[in-house]
Amino acid sequence: MEENRRGARRADAFRIGSLVAEAGAAEIDCLVWDQSETGAQIEVEAGQTVPDAFTLTMTAYVRPRRCKVVWRRGRKLGIIFIV
């Protein structure tokens, strides 16, 4: 059984989102599979280069969140929200 190292329980989100590395940079569309108070799992299109830190904006979520990538598996990434 795989150990759960998350600080908070994640719930299915299935939301559309976009991420931007810095002001003026192109947006990268993503799908947010699940999220918690501390992080999320996202998926980007094949061939997209995702930086180690970025701002994530999700539909149905009021404010953008600063994020940091903690793992990468193909097109899926695990991210934490930076406070």
Image (cartoon, grey):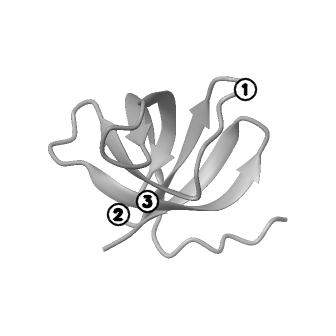
Residue closer to the observer: 44 or 39: 44
Q: Which residue is mark 1?
A: 47
Question: Mark 1 or mark 3, which is nearer to you?
Answer: 1
Q: Single out the residue that lies furthest toward the right.
A: 1
As helix, strand or loop, the secondary structure at mark 3 comes to: strand
Tell me: residue 19, above or below residue 14.
below
Check disc 3: other Cα within 10 Å, few if <14, some if 14-19, many if 20+. many
Residue closer to the observer: 66 or 8: 66
Tell me: residue 3, above or below residue 32.
below
Check disc 2: other Cα within 10 Å, few if <14, some if 14-19, many if 20+. few
Residue at 79 percent across and 39 percent down: it is: 74
Tell me: residue 50, above or below residue 59.
below
Q: Position of residue 45 (x, y in %)?
A: 64, 23
Give the Cα separation between the discs numbered 1 and 3: 20 Å
Q: Which residue is mark 2?
A: 37
Q: Position of residue 19 (x, y in %)?
A: 42, 39
Residue at 37 percent across and 45 percent down: it is: 56
Classify residue 42 as left or right of residue 12.
right
Identify the mark at residue 67; answer none if there is no mark.
3
Give the Cα separation between the discs numbered 3 and 2: 12 Å
Residue at 30 percent across and 45 percent down: it is: 23
Disc on the earlier residue, 3 or 2:
2
As helix, strand or loop, the secondary structure at mark 1 comes to: loop
The amino acid at mark 2 is Glu
The amino acid at mark 1 is Gly
